[in-house]
Amino acid sequence: MIKKLCLICILSFCLTSYASAITITVAQAGGADQTTILGALAAANSGDVIQINDSATYSESLPDPINTKGVGGAILDSLTIQVAAGMTPTIENTTACFNFGPGTTTTTVTGPFVIQGASNTARLTLRSPAGAALVTAGMNATAPPGGSHHAITVANVNIVKPSPSGAQWLAMRNTDGPVTVTNVTCTGGDAATAANFIVFGWPGGPNSFTGTNIDVSQIKAADGSYKVVFFGGTGVFNNCNLTSPTDNTVTNEILNPRNATTGSITFNNCAISPGIRTGALTRRISVGAGGPIQEVFNNCTFGKSGEVPFRIMGGELTKIAGSPTAKTDLSPMIDPLMTPTATLVTFSVEGTVGGDFTLQDVNIVDTYASLQMYRNIPSTARADTVTLTRCFFKNITSGSTFNNSAPSMIYNINNTIWMGARTGLTSGSIFNIVSGGGTSLSISLLHSTFIGGNISSPVALYWFHNHGARNNFITANYCIFDDRQMGAGVASFTHSSLAGNISLCSRGSFLTNGGSNPIPPNWIVGTTATPIDPKLTATGRLTDLTSPAIAAGVGSFSQGAIDIDGNNRPLNNKDLGASQTPFPNAASGWTEFK
């Protein structure tokens, strides 16, 4: 009997709670429950829905936080503001921001909070005063109070800030509930006032942010502004437009992992460009002094950037990836306004910790500079690792590493094609080490192809060169080094100790200058008088089955199982270099890639 009474009480409580959540309609001209947003808030209780039934402009002085039962009323634990189908109203808060949350550092709320337009094509427009964050969650503290695990959803909304205007458009900081932002366009601001566009997370917290179809491309803000400021947790951006207006005369940096000690942020299929300052290339895509943050850019398109497109600090693990058949092109980002004599640092590793960098399925083509790596970290920092997988670099200046008092650096390069120097250049190198007290490189090469010089203009190009006379340690397995186009008397390798399984070097022009084991015994090596032609295509691929590189590889490496174009390799007798020709299928008798 007691169990039955308890069950009846529980069911009665659930039904009462469900029944208490009501929808309060708003229409400015009448015919609804309320004619103002403020009136609807005063009538609302936690869990209620406020629905706007017209396309009017509501210019009102709304409470802070919005989830308040009228001005000076109680804080509502959860609230939904939505729009009826087909309606496109505007809410203009004349005194404060649109702030959802507890409002103080001691109040706790559980949420959820929702503000959404009718659809992607029938949106709600939000306006607020200059200098105020438009949509926020949490409160002004370093972490949410216990119990404030509230979620917030923003969907089908246009966020407009006046000019001039600072602060943020979307500030989703200091809540450890999930934040979901979908179909949101941000506009306004001016090029004279600094501002941050999207801010989320809190240090050490589990905050998660998912943004889909967010467009900040029309925001104008002064130099020193950031499009995404990340305080920790997990962030995912899908199909977002993070570019800059074409008439913006300053650079707005893309990502700032500010003081974040842990966490990850991923950009999927996003358009990314910090913008460019006329006549002075500055700023970069990423800067921070936090901890081991993971930053991943998958299948994104990149536009103009500044002098240092990627600046890595605080131990970030940064990865840029496309796919084998749809590679990500970084050329537009790293080559704006460059000339043959210009110096560009593509990746700058700084701070006291350093950071790792991965390029996977990336193209850099016809640029005056490519993988310029500047390292300015103390000798006590760990060795950084650069991984290049299935990349294609063509007609570039060089891949220099400027090592300033930094420890050893590790390069892992597999299934990558690196082709020569751009027309008009007279010298260059694949790895040109300019040491200011730094140590040597450890370079692991697998199934990669290197072609020296431009076909129409032989140049003095060193494959691996160290100005500091330190010895590079190079392990090359199943690679092709076509150095036939290099200038006369120029060596392929200097200050290098070579090791590894079968590789092909067309001319064999080695100059080790102190290195050991200049030519591994099982390499296929030509001479200046009788060079070996690997019979590569104009893009460095193998298609001619009479090439000495065909089926010359013996053994197996997991990283070499898929070639630069996504084709599988056979278990045995793999081709040398980055590409794999069709191989026999014993079961069918046909040749195949996969």
Image: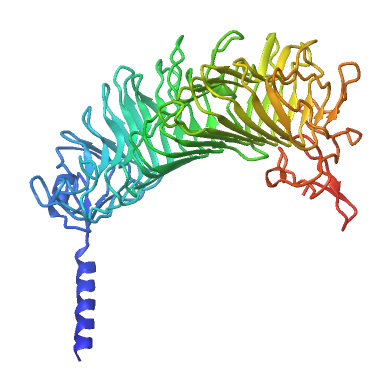
Q: Position of residue 220 (x, y in %)?
A: 36, 23
Q: Is residue 435 above or below residue 29?
A: above
Q: Please tell me in which quadrant of the rendered image residue 504 appears.
A: top right
Could you tell whether 392 is left or right of 355 in the image?
Answer: right
From the viewer's side, name the closer residue of 173 and 9. 173
Q: Position of residue 308 (x, y in %)?
A: 48, 21
Q: Is residue 154 above or below residue 338?
A: below
Q: In the image as oriented, which residue stretches furthest toward the left?
A: 72
Q: Position of residue 479 (x, y in %)?
A: 76, 33
From the viewer's side, name the closer residue of 335 and 573. 573
Could you tell whether 130 is left or right of 581 in the image?
Answer: left
Residue drawn at (40%, 17%) of the image = 250
Q: In the image as oriented, which residue stretches furthest toward the bottom?
A: 1
Residue 211 visible in the shown view:
no
Residue drawn at (22%, 61%) of the image = 22
Quarter of the picture containing the N terminus is bottom left
